[in-house]
Image (spheres, rainbow, N blue to C red):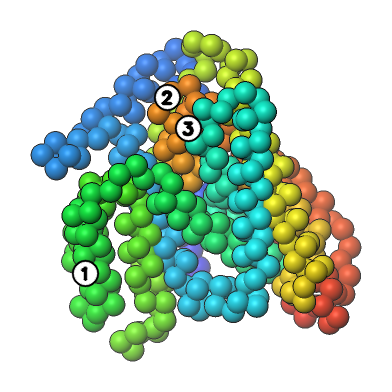
Amino acid sequence: MSTTKMPPVARLRAWVTKETIGGLLLLSAAALALIWANSPWRDSYHSLAEYTVGPAALHLNLDLATWAADGLLAIFFFIVGAELKHEIVDGSLSNPREAAVPMIAAVGGMAVPAVLYVVMVTALGDASALHGWAIPTATDIAFALAVLAIFGRGLPRGLRTFLLTLAVVDDLLAIIVIAAFYTESIGLTSLAIALVCVAAFAFVARSKFARWWILLPIAVVAWSFMHASGVHATIAGVLMGLSLAAKPIHGESAPRTHRYDDIVRPFSAGIALPLFAFFAAGVTFVAGDGIGDVLSEPVLIAIVVALVLGKVIGVLGAATLLTKLTPMRLPDAIGLRDLLPVGLLCGIGFTVSLLIAELSFPDTEHTDAGKLGILLGTLIAATAAAIMLRWDARKARHRDMNEDGLDDADISRIGDE
């Protein structure tokens, strides 16, 4: 069915879930926050972000910024979990041989920026910022895919699958990092109840009587107890996403990972992520030390360099070593030169990076510098990626781009109908 024949609500859902629209909404929300937070009305922005709402009896009287980071972002992580489950069971991660290169590239794309960050903040004399080492390791899937969709037209369609595989593995490792290194204390009773609720969610989600009005209350309870346990509440979203069936069950024609992805993604792309970006990106630099001093902060410099250079070196370096020293090869029709813009796309940290920045530092000075570094690094990486994607698309391609000894059979291109 064409979008013009769809009901208005269906057209809105289709529009908001487009990769290009999702990226633009994220960018617009972040830009609005940054402008408002540095305008004469900046106090009203911070008052809004600090406005507290929620039941105090349940320890959920949180400010709006925390609700966005801990609550709304759990919706996004549910999508990540569902996407991970599908890719592992029946997608790009189901064949270890095909997934090996993007998986190793993802590891390189996390390790090199982390090492580069540690080296730089130490060399610049701010060892107190070492706890932020994970900030430049994350890749924003939605934003990166949006840039690829806009500027990657004419490049092999397999490049999107490669980037998606790499970013999904990157997100999985980022989730592990958040759970392992950014959880100060764990309430075992609350964690146990949360896991029981996740198990109940999995049972209902796989049953014949799965209904949203049953699943939603279970999900809310699982999230609230995960939040109370001290483990970051977004982990509940990931676990529930991973619990979905990735193959058709009960005679259904499509897997439930796709079904629930279709239901939840519009809320994630159109509401949760933009609101998180709005509350996370509002860094004020016109007051206090000023923009010049903020830009010279070691944290900011280290994050920008790690996102832009570290990601490229890690992704391209790992893939080059693997394909040159082992029998492993890149997917059909993709060459090493294509991984230069892919590495830059991976430097678009944004969503998860902003979350880790908030978890990394107890003081506003480091947090604000970290967030500004993420925004600046993301802007540079996205701009450079766009330029390199167009450069790559204009260059002639030979018959065996992945150098596996066989002519490339996959001739589909990004932007083809």
The amino acid at mark 3 is: Ala
Question: Which circle marks residue 281 in the picture?
Answer: 3
Closest to the camera, between mark 3 and mark 2, is: 2
Bin the neighbour count of mark 3 within 10 Å (Cα to Cα): few under 14, some 14-19, many 20 and up. Answer: many
SS under mark 2: loop
Instruction: Look at 66% across and 48% down and name the residue there.
Output: 112
Closest to the camera, between mark 2 and mark 1, is: 2
Q: Nearer the viewer, residue 6 or 70?
A: 70
Relative horizontal placement of residue 371, taking residue 385 as reference (left or right): left
The amino acid at mark 2 is: Asp
Instruction: Look at 47% across and 28% down and name the residue there.
Output: 367
Mark 1 and mark 3: span between their CA atoms? 36 Å
Mark 3 and mark 2: span between their CA atoms? 16 Å
SS under mark 1: helix
Locate residue 393, reporting x and y percent.
80, 57
Instruction: Look at 55% across and 48% down and name the residue there.
Output: 138
Q: Earlier in the sequence, mark 2 or mark 1?
A: 1
Question: Which circle marks residue 98 in the picture?
Answer: none
Bin the neighbour count of mark 2 within 10 Å (Cα to Cα): few under 14, some 14-19, many 20 and up. Answer: few
Locate residue 291, reporting x and y percent.
58, 16
292 w.r.t. 370: above or below: above
* Residue 296 appears in view: yes
Q: Locate residue 294: give its quadrant.
A: top right
Locate residue 356, reporting x and y percent.
46, 41
Residue topped by disc 2: 363
Residue topped by disc 1: 200
Identify the image quadrant of the C terminus: bottom right
Locate residue 349, reporting x and y percent.
56, 44
